[in-house]
Image (tube, helix red, strand yellow):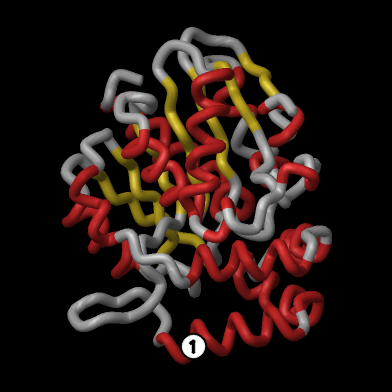
């Protein structure tokens, strides 16, 4: 099975350098449709689905491999090696920000920069660290998700999307969640919400933009501030937006912040 078939890789754009768009939990490559065109004139653009999402090949799904984010990171390395060109920048939404970091640490130099949208290295509060959730919150979330995935999706997706003035985006995220196999979604949720990659942050020397919303139930601003303090070469930009998906609900402000970061790094 080819990497292209496994991950439903779509290559477009034109330019000497490459932007790879990595979607978050419950999403697929179509979630980048409002942001990707802003970069297609300047970069090669690479869109893909994580295995188990979108139009990826479900025959490639291995429960053991994808029980941690490292399995997804291995796939991203292969995608970058096969489809990248020039300097490669990875845009990672939510959990894919950490997947991008792990891919970089596994294959140093593979990325010239990271754009992390709504990232979190750890969702669980700890002494001196605000992740946004107690362990009891996360355990309850996972139990509900595993017991009634469709019901959980219908209730949670609009909250995650936010965007109170754009209810159609919440409905779109509900539909995206509901297209995912419940068992695969449950395993990905465990890999996402129980991960703790705080110790990996100081190891990532690659220039990084942390793009966060000022009102995000999944990744509060305190998380972005922690990452900006901990990563060796990071910039934090907080935009005015309600929700966890600013590339959909506020693509213009997102692109402005990203463009300023890329220009400042000569990319």
Q: Is residue 69 left or right of residue 51?
A: left
Residue appearing at x 54%, y 42% in the figure: 252
Residue occupying the point 46% across, 49% down: 70
Q: Quadrant of residue 168?
A: bottom right
Observer-nearest residue: 203 or 206?
203
Circle 1 — which element? helix
Where residue 45 appears, as percent x and y from the top left, is 59, 23
Q: Nearer the viewer, residue 9 or 117?
A: 9
Quarter location, residue 49:
top right
Q: Is residue 168 left or right of residue 130?
A: right
Residue 264 versus residue 130: which sits nearer the camera?
130
Q: Position of residue 158 (x, y in %)?
A: 69, 72
Residue 99 position within the rendered picture, expressed as x and y whole percent measured from the top left: 46, 47
Whether residue 256 is situated above or below residue 138 in the rendered picture: above
Does residue 41 sit above or below 265 in this rendering? above
Say if 86 sits above or below 57 in the image.
above
Residue 10 coordinates in the image, percent (x, y)? 71, 26
- Say left or right for 160 vs 229: right
Q: What is the residue that sits farthest to the front in this orientation?
A: 64
At x 34% / y 66%, what residue is drawn? 221
Q: Is residue 185 visible?
A: yes
Q: Is residue 166 visible?
A: no
Residue found at x 52% / y 86%: 139
* Mark 1 closeness class: few <14, some 14–19, many ≥20 residues within 10 Å: few
The residue carrying mark 1 is: 137
Give left or right: position of 102 versus 230. Answer: right
> In terms of image quadrants, where is residue 63?
bottom right
In which quadrant of the rendered image does the C terminus lie? top left
């Amino acid at each position: 099975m080819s990497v292209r078939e496994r991950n439903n890789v779509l290559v477009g754009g034109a330019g000497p350098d490459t932007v790879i768009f990595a979607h978050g939990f419950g999403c697929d490559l179509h979630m980048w449709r409002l942001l990707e065109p802003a970069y297609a004139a300047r970069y090669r653009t690479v869109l893909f689905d994580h295995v188990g999402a979108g139009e990826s090949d479900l025959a490639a799904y291995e429960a053991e491999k994808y029980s941690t984010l490292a399995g997804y990171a291995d796939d991203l390395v292969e995608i970058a090696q096969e489809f990248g060109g020039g300097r490669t920048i990875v845009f990672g939404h939510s959990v894919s920000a950490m997947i991008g970091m792990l891919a970089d640490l596994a294959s140093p130099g593979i990325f010239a920069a990271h754009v992390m949208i709504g990232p979190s290295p750890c969702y669980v509060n700890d002494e001196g660290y605000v992740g946004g959730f107690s362990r009891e919150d996360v355990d309850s979330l996972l139990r509900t998700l595993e017991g009634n995935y469709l019901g959980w999706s219908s209730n949670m997706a609009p909250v995650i999307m936010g965007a109170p003035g754009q209810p159609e985006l919440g409905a779109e995220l509900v539909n995206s969640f509901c297209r995912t196999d419940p068992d695969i979604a449950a395993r990905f949720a465990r890999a996402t919400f129980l991960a703790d990659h705080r110790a990996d942050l100081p190891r990532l020397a690659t220039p990084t933009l942390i793009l966060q919303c000022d009102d995000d139930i999944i990744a509060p601003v305190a998380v972005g501030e922690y990452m900006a303090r901990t990563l060796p070469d990071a910039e934090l930009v907080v935009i005015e937006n309600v929700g966890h998906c600013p590339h959909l609900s506020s693509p213009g402000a997102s692109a402005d912040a990203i463009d300023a970061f890329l220009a400042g790094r000569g990319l």
